[in-house]
Image (cartoon, rainbow, N blue to C red):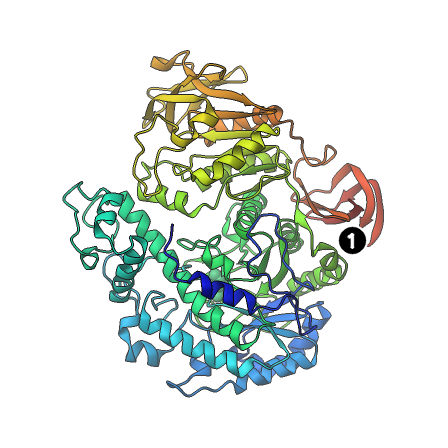
């Protein structure tokens, strides 16, 4: 359990201070704090926000009126501003000047374009880094981060927290009654460039974190971390170092896992300061943040503090265009697994470039294709990054909707086309969730970081999840990602890949879901660790044994799989296991599902199947990546009776269904460069083309359709 920096009473008081509905009557969002996170949770946006990240401080004030006209012509209604403008708003300590943004917000507002403001704490001004160098982050090698780019200040530092509260309060009070400011983004992409922190401020906060976590009892810390190993016993909390990887060599995995929890805690606490101030200043504002990055637990306090989680979407970082659809779908499904449908504060709108890379320029139709993939997978509002390409700074070639010369070209035309379509698609989309029947467990903070602390160079659980997801996605299944603490309602097949830490709180639900007919699949090494990241002495797979109905009797790493190939037999074929093997012993009543086929394991159980009620638990004693995953996916689909979303959709056409009580939206997305003929469609109206559809349609290259049907 993480220490709670937010006492329960404060949390309750805060919640009760939130109005039940949006009192302003303005388009925006009814506050949704305290709705439990779930992949099925929809946002409470009352309109689809469509717009751009806008930077009047980069010279755009001169073109603002023309910009606003062009935005309106592209169907836009929202801009996001000010996330890197602290220097402008507080040019010297304590002297605030918001007139610049007052002007920009008012002029945009007069045209009907509303503003989301940001707290500017991702880039503290020079006067602050000069007067308080102790706020600067320090990396694992002890190098102090310098002023000159961004994210150089420590969210753990009490001094920096104080400055963060001051600028947030000044902005909040100044804009509280501005009718055109509808919401806020906290900071910008916490932990995007680097997440660790070894500054003196972090060391100080670390002591407080540990004291709270171990209830002031240093003996409890020593026990929990097994500090008897390598003479690590600590006499006082003040003596416990921040663990920098590799310095000098291997670290205690328990110490390391708590350090990652600590970093997540400092980020959540830093954000919470800002959220409290913003909510107190104006309850009608909704609050978001743009993720997703390392060492932030978006499902924990961090996400619970927000009305809606944001997810920045940059598919062009996948260099191979053939993989872009699958990786984007996975990133979005994983984002939705944290808390539900999300906001996209930044969506790629052109090729991005920084010092050492320059993306492919999206080809005609590719930008629109990417946007529809985002809409299909849970985006409830989208802002493009950015309106116009900057002329200077580290991102002077990060291309926006408009080029440097301000001439609207094909990117603008494509964006305007989507804007026109959104007039029909946007309202239909709000209130729907993504309907899936197959899911892979992902986004568990502890498991991700327990793996990093001691990984044996094995693939991370989320990496294996991404690969499995890719197999299902390419074959057209209704696949997503779901955290094991979330509801499993609607799922038929659920795979937990290699979670070494299994929270016993997940077990009752897993069992009742299996008894009701679900097929649960568990990958090797599951349940081998306790919550502190120490190894269990229970028979493996530890707390999962009763569900699995089998025991792991031997395990090993394969370091040169070609030299001593260990193969298992899947559907009559031999498949090489490259990472890890386990020999299983089924309990009475548990079937052997797969066997090893080579070397000293020939004929021993490699996977078991435990029937339970109407469902079954499959335990696979190897890693679910590579050839093993590819061969297993069709077998698992058969076992769980899951079928592709639409039998008449050809390869390369993605089909995703979003649903509400009264309607379904069928997203059809052609990822290929050829026209594709789709049959077997339900009768409904294609909201993109604005025409009725019956049974079939042909999607142009990179074309999209969104068919609305009754549920
Ligand atoms: C995001 C960031 C933006 C901008 C963009 C393009 O990660 O939030 O500020 O840097 O990438 O690089």
- Seen at 48% across and 70% down, the residue is 276
* Image coords of residue 487 (percent x, y): 57, 42
Could you say which is closer to the camera, residue 636 or residue 688? 636
Farthest residue in the front direction? 9
Residue 568 pos. (x, y %):
45, 18
Residue at image position (46%, 76%) is: 168
Q: Specify whether 13 is left or right of 295.
A: right
Residue at 59% across, 59% down: 343
Q: Quadrant of residue 158?
A: bottom left
Ligand 1 neighbours mark 1 (CB distance < 8 Å): no
139 vs 369: above or below? below
**Residue 74, position in %: x, y?**
70, 67
Viewer-closest of 44 and 572: 44
Q: Residues within 10 Å of mark 1 (few under 14, many from 20)?
A: many
Q: In the displayed structure, does residue 343 sit left or right of residue 576?
A: right
Is residue 525 visible to the viewer in this orientation of the structure? no
Q: Circle 1 sits on which residue? A: 687
Determine which quarter of the picture holds residue 225. top left
- Residue 67's spot in the image, x, y percent? 65, 76
Is residue 176 placed above or below 499 in the rendered structure?
below
Name which quarter of the figure residue 446 lies in. Answer: top left
- Quadrant occupied by the C terminus: top right
Left or right position of 685 against 657: right
Nearer-the-camera pick, 597 or 25: 25
Query: Which is nearer the eye, 689 or 236?
Result: 236
Q: Is mark 1 on a helix, strand or loop?
A: loop
């Amino acid at each position: 359990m993480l220490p709670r920096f937010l006492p329960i009473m404060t949390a309750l008081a805060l919640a009760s201070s939130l109005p039940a509905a949006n009192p302003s009557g303005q388009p925006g969002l009814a506050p949704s704090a305290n709705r439990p996170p779930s992949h099925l949770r929809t946002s409470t946006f009352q309109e689809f926000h469509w717009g751009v990240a806008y930077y009047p401080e980069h010279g755009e004030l001169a073109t603002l009126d023309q910009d606003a006209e062009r935005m309106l012509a592209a169907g836009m209604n929202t801009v996001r501003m000010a996330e890197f403008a602290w220097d402008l708003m507080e040019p010297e300590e304590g002297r605030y000047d918001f007139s610049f943004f007052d002007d920009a917000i008012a002029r945009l507002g007069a045209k009907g374009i509303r503003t989301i403001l940001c707290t500017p704490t991702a880039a503290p001004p020079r006067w602050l880094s000069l007067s308080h160098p102790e706020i600067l982050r320090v990396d694992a090698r002890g190098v102090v981060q310098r002023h000159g780019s961004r994210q150089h200040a420590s969210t753990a530092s009490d001094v920096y927290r104080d400055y963060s509260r001051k600028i947030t309060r000044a902005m909040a009070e100044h804009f509280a009654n501005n009718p055109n400011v509808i919401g806020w983004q906290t900071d910008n992409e916490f932990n995007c460039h680097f997440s660790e922190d070894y500054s003196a401020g972090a060391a100080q906060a670390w002591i407080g974190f540990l004291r709270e976590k171990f209830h002031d009892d240093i003996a409890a810390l020593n026990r929990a971390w097994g500090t008897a190993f390598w003479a690590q016993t600590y006499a006082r909390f003040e003596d416990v170092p921040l663990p920098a990887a590799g310095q000098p060599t291997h670290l205690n995995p328990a110490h390391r896992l708590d350090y990652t929890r600590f970093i997540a805690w400092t980020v959540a606490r830093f954000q919470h300061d800002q959220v409290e101030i913003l909510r107190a200043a104006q309850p009608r504002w909704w609050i978001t943040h743009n993720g997703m990055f390392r060492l932030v637990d978006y499902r924990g306090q961090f996400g619970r503090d927000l009305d809606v989680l944001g997810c920045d979407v940059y598919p062009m970082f996948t260099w191979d265009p053939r993989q872009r659809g699958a990786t984007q779908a996975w990133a979005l499904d994983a984002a939705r697994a944290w808390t539900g449908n999300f906001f996209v504060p930044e969506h790629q709108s052109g090729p991005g470039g920084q010092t050492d890379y320059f993306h492919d320029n999206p080809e005609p139709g590719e930008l629109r294709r990417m946007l529809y993939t985002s809409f299909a997978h849970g985006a409830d509002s989208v802002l493009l990054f950015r309106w116009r390409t900057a002329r200077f700074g580290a991102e002077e070639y990060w291309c926006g909707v408009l080029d440097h010369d301000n001439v609207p070209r094909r990117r603008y035309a494509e964006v305007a086309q989507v804007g026109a379509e959104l007039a029909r698609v946007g309202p239909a989309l709000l209130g729907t969730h993504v309907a899936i029947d197959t899911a892979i467990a992902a986004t568990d903070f502890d498991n991700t970081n327990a793996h990093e602390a001691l990984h044996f160079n094995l693939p991370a659980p989320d990496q294996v999840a991404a690969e499995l997801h890719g197999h299902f996605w390419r074959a057209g299944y209704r696949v997503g990602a779901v955290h094991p603490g979330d509801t499993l309602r609607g799922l038929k097949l659920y795979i937990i890949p290699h979670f070494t830490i299994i929270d016993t709180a997940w077990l009752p639900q897993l069992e009742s879901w299996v008894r009701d007919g679900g097929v649960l699949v568990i990958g090797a090494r599951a349940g081998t660790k306790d919550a502190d990241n120490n190894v269990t002495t229970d028979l493996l797979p530890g707390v999962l044994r009763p569900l699995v109905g089998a025991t792991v009797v031997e395990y090993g790493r394969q370091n040169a799989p070609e030299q001593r190939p260990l193969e298992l037999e899947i559907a009559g074929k031999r498949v090489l296991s490259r990472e890890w093997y386990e020999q299983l012993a089924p309990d009475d009543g548990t079937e052997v599902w797969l066997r090893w086929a080579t070397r000293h394991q020939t004929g021993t159980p490699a996977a078991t199947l435990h029937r339970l009620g109407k469902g079954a638990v499959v335990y696979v004693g190897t890693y679910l990546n590579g050839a093993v995953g590819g061969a297993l996916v069709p077998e698992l689909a058969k076992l769980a009776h899951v079928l592709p979303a639409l039998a008449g959709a050809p390869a390369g056409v993605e089909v995703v269904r979003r649903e509400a009580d009264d309607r379904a939206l069928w997203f059809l997305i052609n990822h290929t460069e050829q026209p594709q003929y789709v049959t077997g469609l339900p009768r409904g109206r294609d909201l993109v083309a604005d025409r009725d559809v019956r049974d079939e349609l042909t999607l142009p290259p990179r074309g999209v359709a969104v068919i609305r049907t009754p549920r």
